[in-house]
Amino acid sequence: MRIEKLSFAPDGFVPNNPALPFVCYRGGLDLTAGDAEQAIIRHFAANGWGDAWINGIYPFQHYHATAHEVLGIARGRALVQFGGPNGPRHEVLAGDAVFIPAGVGHCRLDMSRDLSVVGAYPEGQTADLRRDTASDFRGAAERIAKVGFPRLDPVTGAAYTAATEPARRD
């Protein structure tokens, strides 16, 4: 597994998150045992991430001001822009996962026809849907600041010991 971390400044009407980095786990999910979507749901649940869904990634800039989100790519591939309309583009493939802190913008730009994504949220958090508009931006920073840190990393299961770095699991 290769881990990539990025922090984003606010981008237009996308607030991003000043306290937690976006994390991409390249090859972080084991999809070899049976149904990929169910395997990802079980993996996330074992690390305290629930309220799982199976779908895709919205093709418009959006973020969540009331919850962190993890996406696991079960099948296919997608080109996704993270951090807002001027943010970097990442291709994510089956077996990859991304941790998207509350406030971090994301938008699917392209996808394969077989794309299947599993999303989940930390226990006790419920996601809202916010777009990059002035009305959704108002008050978003205050809501994001109230979102607690996840208890466990959704992919590694390591405990968060500080705002920006999960503890390493050996």
Image (tube, rainbow, N blue to C red):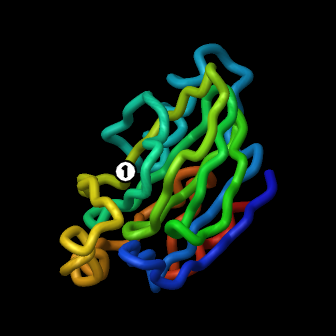
Task: In the rendered view, tell whether residue 2 sits above or below residue 51.
Answer: below
| Crowd around label 1: few <14 · some 14–19 · many ≥20 (10 Å) | many
**Residue at which label 1 appears:** 121
Where does residue 96 sit, x and y in percent of width and height? 68, 43
Residue pictured at 56% horizontal, 62% vertical:
82
Residue pictured at 24% horizontal, 53% vertical:
126
For residue 104, which quarter of the picture?
A: bottom left
Task: In the rendered view, tell whether residue 44 sits above or below residue 141.
Answer: above
Residue pictured at 50% horizontal, 68% vertical:
84
Q: Nearer the viewer, residue 99 or 16?
A: 16
**Quarter of the image containing the C terminus?**
bottom right
Horizontal arrangement in the rendering, residue 147 relative to residue 6 (left or right): left
Q: Nearer the viewer, residue 79 or 155?
A: 79
Name the element at disc 1.
strand
Horizontal arrangement in the rendering, residue 6 relative to residue 137 (left or right): right
Q: Amino acid at mark 1?
A: Tyr
Horizontal arrangement in the rendering, residue 55 relative to residue 137 (left or right): right
Residue pictured at 60% horizontal, 27% vertical:
115
Number of labelled discs? 1
